[in-house]
Image: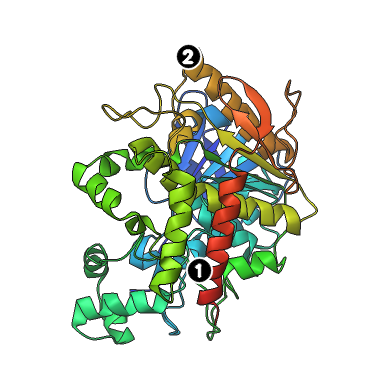
Amino acid sequence: MFAKLQVLLYLVCMTRADVLVTVQGMLRGEEHDGYTSYTGIPYATVPRNNGRFKVLVWVTGIGGGYKPGQLVQRDIIVVVVHHRQGPVGFLCLTEDKVPGNAGVKDVVLALRWVRDNIVAFKGNPASVVIAGQSFGAAMVEALTLSPMAHGLYHGVILQSGTVLAPWSFNYDAKQRAMALAKMIGDDEESTTLQNANIVDLVDKSNKLDMSYFPFGICEDRSLRNEERLLFEAPIDLLTGRKVNEVPIMMGYNTDEAYVFASALNDPKVMEKISKDISVLLPVELKFINEKEMNQVAQQIEDVYFKKDRSLPSFLAYHRDTYFISHIYRSARLHASSSSLPVYFYQFSYSGDAGVVPQRGVEKTGAAHSDELAFLFGSDLDGDDGAAQEHLVRLWTNFVKYLNPNRKESTPWTALDPTGPRVFDIGTETKMVDFPHTKVTRMWDDVYKVYFYSRNRK
């Protein structure tokens, strides 16, 4: 069951010709409003020629649909890559048949397909930007740390996600796999997993009592006849400057944790947190004793809850803890380890598109995934349309020029970690001082001591 599954590709390009000829035969496209899409593309080898269009390869996250009409109307090609997910895509063992990271390796195969075949769609294989959001962004960032993907892309866009986040990378990948094996066969044998069917794997993994996603990206082992994605943990690769250097555009949404609003607004949850603030501490932090835990809990109390323990303060805490602190750490390390620019942004607009507001809970900015409704949605008007125009223009500028600046009234300067500023995107655009410097420094210290150092072998 661990044989490679077919990667489904959806290519969209600005062309009126709906039939293309490959060496395997003709491929017919489907007409849409202003563009043609090609679905279920075969792995083919086609004659090389000079491609006109720059290419955006979009790596899907956990779910969602993507309609790239807004993007392709700016004269680029969009390739949407679907990959294996869950235990089928990210089960990781020290066994030859279950090396891990199969979902990310699917993306590598897709990038190789783009390199060899995109010219048939008038695309330029020498100008490829790869992008993703949330877990998709973590997968893309993993490729910047891997020799497997070297030379297959020329720029990167990371939206609201990073491989440094504990919800995307598993230090305890083998323990998670053994927990699944025990649930399936009442033992901890790898053969139990290898012999299980996909339906049983997925069903049982959904029942595992684990933090975040049950299975994520892992450090590959040295296995026979298998390419390795990651030779070390991502934090060590980044701090060691073992990075494929390309221009990067990355950032976050200002109200990322709004997607947790309904859960946090539960009276029982609020009461539990109010009685003991330490229950908020991230489960991945490893404390040797209660004194260490209480010290960190007091830091959190002083930063977020000194005035009150209200829902807005809890949302700010979750925004910083699970998103912004890790995203900025990644941006800072990329900017420090590369001679090429890192364009750092925050999307701050809250409008009618995107995540629907919860009754009685104010939405103060863009929630996690809100930008997707603007990049992959239909035409918007009013303030929504203004925000959409900025996002689509800046994103496609980066795809075409590896620089979002193209006759911009407000220049977007690259990140300087010594004095961090961020490009704010709303109905207008502007450079502002990064507003979370103090809290990200605190979380850097906490994770350095209680997470990264205590997970090193």
**Image location (x, y in percent) of residue 384:** 48, 19
Three-letter code for the amino acid on which mark 1 is drawn: Phe
Which one is nearer the viewer's eye here, 139 or 417?
417
Q: Relative to residue 272, is residue 355 depicted above or below?
A: above
Residue depicted at 40% across the width and 79% down the height: 174
**Residue occupied by mark 2:** 381
Residue depicted at 34% across the width and 38% down the height: 310
In which quadrant of the rendered view does residue 15 lie? top right
Mark 2–mark 1 Cα distance, whole angstroms, equals 45 Å
Count of number-bearing discs: 2
Residue depicted at 34% across the width and 62% down the height: 211
Which one is nearer the viewer's eye here, 354 or 4?
354
Farthest residue toward the right? 339
**Image location (x, y in percent) of residue 338:** 76, 56
In the rendered view, does 164 fall on the left or right side of 342?
Answer: left
Three-letter code for the amino acid on which mark 2 is drawn: Asp
In which quadrant of the rendered view does residue 297 lie? bottom left
Residue depicted at 44% across the width and 39% down the height: 369
SS category of the residue bearing label 1: helix
Is residue 192 among the parts visible in the rendering? Answer: yes
**Residue occupied by mark 1:** 451
**Image location (x, y in percent) of residue 63:** 37, 47
Q: Relative to residue 326, is residue 424 depicted above or below?
A: above
In which quadrant of the rendered view does residue 412 lie? top right
**Image location (x, y in percent) of residue 21:** 57, 45
SS category of the residue bearing label 2: loop
